[in-house]
Image (cartoon, rainbow, N blue to C red):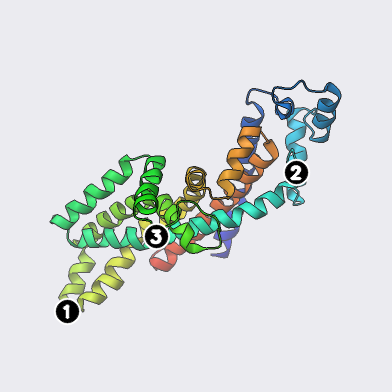
Amino acid sequence: MGRYVARRLLQMIPVFIGTTLIIFLMVHVLPGDPIRAMWGDKAADPAQVASLRHEFGLDQPLWRQYIDYMVNLFQGDFGKTFGGRPVSEEMGMAFPVTLRLAAVALTIEIIVGIGLGAWAGLKAGRAVDTGVLIFTLIVISMPVFVLGYLARFIFADELGWLPPNVQNSMDVEQLLLPGFVLAMLSMAYVARLTRTTFAENLRADYMRTALAKGLPRRRIIGVHLLRNSLIPVITFLGTDVGALVGGAVVTEGIFNVQGVGNLLFNALGRREGSTIVGVVTVFVLVILLINLVVDLLYAVLDPRIRYA
């Protein structure tokens, strides 16, 4: 196990360098000059433009900028915004908000998604199964921004059950509606995946053996069926955490959540490379570590799996 973890950590190094390099190059090949854009329609002072370009290292060759960025990154320095604030401070304020929102969404996704999928799988071929499949298909077919505005119109504007905008991100109740919208798409996939694995495993030999041994139905479903059916679901949930954080860009805009989505959106508008690359770098690290944890969880769920 220890050798496997060490090998996976070493494999993360080229993946991390490759992804950050791609994002860095993509930001810097975008058309337009981010420094001149700070003046808007007004005429820019060439001396100030040159000074700012030198201050942010934009007068250096691209390869030199990337090396300097990575050297500073390994020292914990994510650079500065065009406003002069450290990017780490901006991310330190935005990431907890988005992680809180993603945690709410993931909780809803796990409880509702697995619950619906298990219910449909146990009733495969019946009206409940058909209803769940139709509902999830409708959710999957709708864009996130449509779901967001529709949910806000129904639950906030018409019924008044939840606030339409998030004023305090520490209040979990205010995060329920954006968390529900953020979870909807993934919840539909989790429900369909759980339903399929439940329906398949119900016909497996070990299920027939458990039934023949006369084990209680609750134990058969809760221990044998659920445990074996959750392996592909956990794989999806692990990779979906990154998608939840990325998907928050749209959801945070609809519900005025001051998280990393808003930070990234504003940075893209200003073409602020240090903030964009910094946010994506943290995304990459989180996704790589979550994938490692998910792989290790396989052995917990299925004792037959061993790591060399």
Circle 1: residue type = Gly
Q: Quadrant of residue 262?
A: top right
Q: CA distance from mark 3 to mark 1?
A: 34 Å
User: In front here: 169 or 209?
Assistant: 169
Is disc 1 surrounded by few (<14), some (14 to 19) or many (20+) residues within 10 Å?
Answer: few
SS of the residue under disc 2? loop
Q: CA distance from mark 1 to mark 2?
A: 64 Å
Mark 2: give few (<14), some (14-19) or many (20+) Cα within 10 Å.
many
Residue at screen point 20% across, 63% down: 122
Earlier-in-chain disc, 3 versus 1:
3
Q: Which residue is mark 3?
A: 108
Answer yes or no: is residue 308 visible.
Answer: no
Seen in the image, is 231 located left or right of residue 49?
left
Query: Would you identify the image quadrant in which residue 261 lies?
Result: top right
Q: Which mark is residue 214?
A: 1
Tell whether label 2 touches label 3 (CB within 8 Å): no
* Front tag of 3 and 1: 3
| Residue 2 visible in image | yes
Residue 99: horizontal and vertical position, in percent?
54, 56
- For the residues bearing labels 3 and 1, Cβ distance under 8 angstroms: no
Taking the image as shown, residue 168 lies to the left or right of residue 105, namely right
Q: Mark 2 — residue?
A: 79
Q: Give how far across and how far down residue 64 sits, in percent.
A: 77, 33
Q: Looking at the picture, how far across and down is residue 207, in whole percent? A: 21, 68
- Name the mark on residue 13: none
Q: CA distance from mark 3 to mark 2?
A: 36 Å
